Amino acid sequence: MSFQAKRVFKKAISWAGLFFFAVAAYVLYNQLSKYSLDDIKNAVFSIPTKNLWLACLASFFGYVALSSYDYLALRYIGRKLAIWKWIFAGIIGFSVSNNAGHAIVSGGTIRYRLYTRWRFRGTEIVRMVTFSGFTYLVACFFLIIVGYLITPNHAFGAGSVSKLTTQIVTICSVIGLLGYFALSIWYKKPLKIKDVELDMPSFKMALAQMIIGAVDIVMASLVLYFSLIPFVEIPFETFMGVFIIAQVLGVFSQVPGGLGVFEGLFMYIIPGEHNQVLLFGALLAYRVIYYLMPLVLSAIVLFSYEGYLKYIKKQQLEKVKLFRMQEIARQEKEKTAV
């Protein structure tokens, strides 16, 4: 590939980050457009103020936990970066991928745009995004196992096929998790794909991947839990099991935000006709607090940052221009003096 072609390709990937930001915004708009503003307002404000604040705090710490994926990925490739930068990239990347779906592509392009500006090579960014993908996969394995153990039996369906399917998925998750840990201990050969070299992380790193992924989903679950408990009495361990199963299936459905899959399964697992209307408000508040608000705030921060960079670049160009003009004036003065 020629230098010019590489340059065009890099710019295309960089601009794709903003494209996926727009896609995420459009997808979220479609998700919420079927509800009127009154529906959304009533759903959110029917929840006690204290619970709303707790849900917002859980959402904030959840995105901080998600940004820790980037911190681990930086450790994995042996690079250091200012704390605000990896938190910034992580929160914005996940606010987009949570809404747009296909996290490696949508969140990856946002990261590419940001990390290349912080002087990271393309191969390093690919390694980071790949590692973060495995972090999420390991977390899913772990959470499927936990979800199976603590979710009520009726959630897996009355039929033998649905129960057998759930058991097979859980067994595969156990094998996947144990296999990943085994490879982290005994497999030391790097895997090379074209110009990208991927090393197996250490056991400590693999364990950190599992823990951070678990913290992320616990924080996300608390957003819905604080929105739900004013209306529905449910033990936290039962709720967590339901949330984990619904969340993981929503993610693997590849529907942006797990829309419909998450809500449908959640409302099916928690029985009671009277709960359906109450669940609507809690689930809608969850969508607003965990998906809409982070995306809106990320948009404001990202475009402010883009504007700031353009301003800095303009200032630098003006300084260079002024310096050149001074140099020309100095040279002209020297010629005149001679």
Image (cartoon, rainbow, N blue to C red):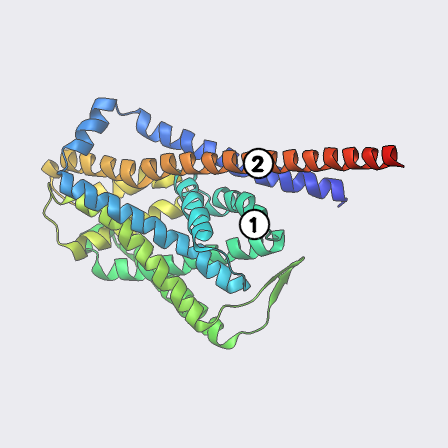
In front: 81, or 191?
Answer: 81
Q: Residue furthest front?
A: 337
Q: Tell me the SS state at disc 1.
A: loop
In front: 275, or 224?
Answer: 224
In front: 100, or 118?
Answer: 118
Residue drawn 90% across the image and 37% down it: 338
Q: Which residue in the structure is indicated by mark 2? A: 15
Q: Can you tell which quarter of the image residue 272 is in? A: top left
**Residue 85 pos. (x, y %):** 46, 50
**Residue 151 pos. (x, y %):** 21, 56
Q: How many marks?
A: 2
Residue drawn 69% across the image and 41% down it: 7
**Residue 82 pos. (x, y %):** 47, 55
Q: Is residue 225 left or right of residue 140?
A: left
Residue drawn 23% across the image and 55% down it: 241
Residue drawn 49% across the image and 42% down it: 106
Q: Which residue in the structure is indicated by mark 1? A: 118
Q: Can you tell which quarter of the image residue 278 is in? A: top left
Three-letter code, disc 2: Trp
